[in-house]
Amino acid sequence: HLTCFIIDYYLTKLIIKRDELQLIGACSLLIATKFHEIKPPLINDLVFISDQAYQYDDVIKIEYDILQKINFNLNLPCSLAFFQLFSCKLGFRNFQKNLGMYLLETALLEYEYLRFMPSVRSLSVCYLLLDTSDSQVMEKYKNLEALNNPKIIRECALKFKSIFEYRPDSNVCNFKAVRKKYSSEKYLMVALV
């Protein structure tokens, strides 16, 4: 999630050539893994994977440029962080948490979701996953929803609902890797719902 957010934020700051996108994506991934992982990938590995489309020095230069443009602010709000917070507050079970992560990850690369703030995307997913028969959970949700515009949350939730309408023979879900990931037992096969 952080990688995509870095790319989006960086691209709002300047216009780039299409052939630089792979380098910007690789550098954003490198920055995000340095922030989150104990052992991030080596720059030489990124150069190798790119089939030498760029060089070591190019990665260093763009990595520095990205960090400058985002003011070294890597504590960017992303929908997954909000969802983890909200799902704990609402007492979601593992199945609900995995399903929420699936929805957010599927929407991560969809342009139509970018107009919604990360907190709104997360609340929209929570709205879809709520057990409406539990009055205590509903009360907690109403308190969270009060921080945002309920109309916008429901509008976003309708977009997320379309992900449930996926059929294997259709093109509703273009991200087969995400679907495959969340169809595994590790993620409780939530993509098959």
Image (cartoon, grey):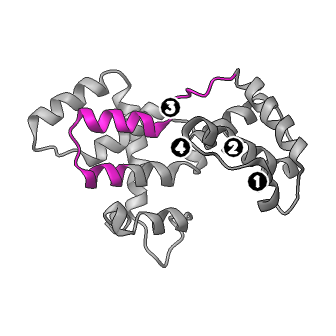
For residue 46, the mark is: 1
Query: What x and y, as percent, mark residue 66?
Result: 76, 32
| Residue highlighted by disc 3 | 117
Query: What x and y, as percent, mark residue 114?
Result: 57, 39
| Residue highlighted by disc 4 | 113
The amino acid at mark 1 is: Leu
Residue contact at pointers 2 and 1, CB within 8 angstroms: yes
| Residue highlighted by disc 2 | 30
Q: Which residue is drawn at 80% across and 30% down?
A: 64
Instruction: Say which quarter of the image contains residue 81.
Output: top left
Element on which disc 4 rests? helix
Query: What's the magenta region?
Result: 72-100
Query: From mark 1 to mark 4, how far is it between C-alphas?
Result: 29 Å
First-in-chain label (2 vs 1): 2
Query: From mark 2 to mark 1, how far is it between C-alphas?
Result: 8 Å
Instruction: Say which quarter of the image contains residue 123.
Output: top left
Residue contact at pointers 1 and 3, CB within 8 angstroms: no
Main SS of the magenta segment? helix
In the rendered view, tell whether residue 119 sits above or below residue 114: above
First-in-chain label (4 vs 2): 2
The amino acid at mark 3 is: Met
Element on which disc 3 rests? loop
Is any part of residue 147 visible from this angle?
yes
